[in-house]
Image (cartoon, rainbow, N blue to C red):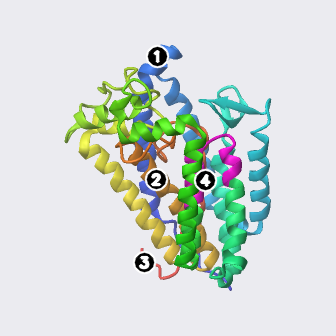
Amino acid sequence: MEKTVRPLDTVLLAAVIGLLAAGLFMVYSASSVWGEFVQGDSFYFLKRQLIFAGVGVAAMIFISKIDYWFWQRWSVVILVICFFLLIAVLVPGIGMVRGGARSWIGAGAFSIQPSEFMKLGMIIFLAHFLMEHHKKITSFRKGMLPSLLLIFTAFGLIMLQPDLGTGTVMAGTCFVLLFVAGARIRHFVFLGALGIAGFAGLILSAPYRIQRITSFLDPWSDPLGAGFQIIQSLYAVGPGGLFGLGFGDSRQKYYYLPEPQTDFIFAILAEEAGFIGAGFVLILFGILLWRGIATALTAPDMFGAFLATGICGMIFIQVLINIGVVTGLFPVTGITLPFLSYGGSSLTLMLVAVGILLNITRYRTNYHR
């Protein structure tokens, strides 16, 4: 059946561009002191982020012109490539170790993080799988079990790096897709109990994770150790007040908050732009969520609906975890803030995902300009 091609959703696109612009400003402000001290160039991180943003926007525009059914045809190949990269990154000499995790493949500062691309690869494959087997999803053995085996295999490979934050986002996104596809509530209750036991085991298996939990519950019990990051983050968020200290006037970026341009960039945003600036960014994320949900609801087929749902779920689970960590609601996980945090793999992946989402908007039904 021939489908009518609509204009791109300009509201969704404007929200993403707004977030990207805010991210570039904040990457410069948050990293200028660190860049000057370590690299001898206050613009070092901004220059690199501009390259990542340029590549990502070009990829987003290009992919927005590719019919999203293309990803359905190649979903198995994409997933196999993602699994291959996850295995390759664990091989000494191929995978690069940073911050205690073997999560990158590449040379020098230019590298990719395979676990980031697995998030999108898994969404594409599950959208295809659930489209073909949605009638079986109420059966644990025929519908849920094959999906869970795939999800837990990918999660296990990510945990071998280890990268609990990325693995949590991927698994959480997959569970959202299973729920939307019609999986039974009692299956999720069982998975919830299993997940709590599994997370408890993961936490107890690594001393640094136990420290993160104890520092989350009482960061002042170890203010110079495990609780240092969250305390410094709250010192940034609190003084920001209503209007903030002003662009470039953060105090916490002066070597108090470690690498503030990555996981804790929202803390610097709240410090410099205050409640007004942080609220504006949250409104942009809200607009993105609104238009993403609308895209899923008006997609012309189940694959498009599942794909849009998965992309929205991935972005907003990550936003929720990142801001929750910055404000002390969740333990520190090492999750970046989409479109704002410094980092090539994360930014490129998010813009590629938005490109797919934009293409789905071109075929939406019940169209209203």
C-alpha gap between disc 1 and disc 4: 31 Å
Which residue position is annotated with label 1? 36
Q: Residue at x 26, y 31 (%)?
A: 246
Image quarter hosting the C terminus: bottom left
Q: Amino acid at mark 4?
A: Val
Which residue position is annotated with label 4? 352
Q: Residue at x 44, y 66 (%)?
A: 291
Which residue position is annotated with label 3? 368
- For marks 2 and 1 on the same chain, the one whose residue lies earlier in the sequence: 2
Q: Amino acid at mark 2?
A: Val
Q: Is residue 27 visible?
A: yes
Percent across and percent down for residue 38 are 51, 16
User: Is 237 one of the magenta-colored residues?
Assistant: no
Image: magenta residue range: 155-172
C-alpha gap between disc 1 and disc 3: 49 Å
Q: Amino acid at mark 1?
A: Glu
Question: Are circles 1 and 3 on residues that touch, CB within 8 Å?
Answer: no
Question: Nearer the viewer's eye, disc 4 or disc 3?
Answer: 4
